[in-house]
Amino acid sequence: MLNSLMCFAASALMPGLGQAFESRWYEAAAFLFGTVFAYLMCMPVGVGVHLWSSIDAAAFTSRRRRAYALRLFVHK
């Protein structure tokens, strides 16, 4: 929970930072440059992409945690 919140907050401060925190470098670069491009084209679209970046960072963290817990449960 705390890691998901940290990733969400990091991406809220700067798009892609939450993905970089999870070592997802290509996604981090894509969200950073995509959000900058979207803000330059149209402000509401930029806000949407920025929000998408934050939600993706938090959601990926919780999916990774669930997959790890399942893997530990299955292999024992």
Image (cartoon, rainbow, N blue to C red):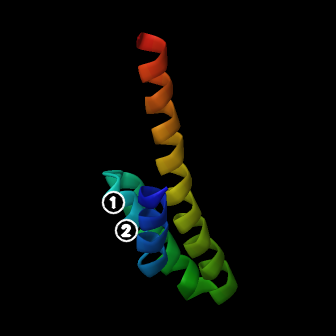
Q: Quadrant of the C terminus?
A: top left
Q: Is residue 34 left or right of residue 72?
A: right
- At which x and y percent is residue 41? 60, 84
The answer to whether 75 appears left or right of 55 in the picture is left
Q: Amino acid at mark 2?
A: Leu
Q: Which residue is mark 1?
A: 20
| Coordinates of residue 20 in the picture (x, y in percent) | 33, 60
Quarter-wise, where is residue 3 in the image? bottom left
Furthest toward the top, the residue is 76
**Number of the label disc, if any, that sits on residue 8:** none
CB atoms of marks 2 and 1 within 8 Å: yes
For the point 48% across and 64% down, the residue is 5
User: For mark 2, what is the residue?
Assistant: 17
**Number of other residues with Cα within 10 Å of mark 1, as a class: few under 14, some 14 to 19, many 20 or more:** some
Q: Percent position (x, y) of residue 58?
A: 52, 58
Q: Going 65% across and 75% down the picture, which residue do you hit?
A: 48
Q: CA distance from mark 2 to mark 1?
A: 5 Å
Q: Amino acid at mark 1?
A: Ala
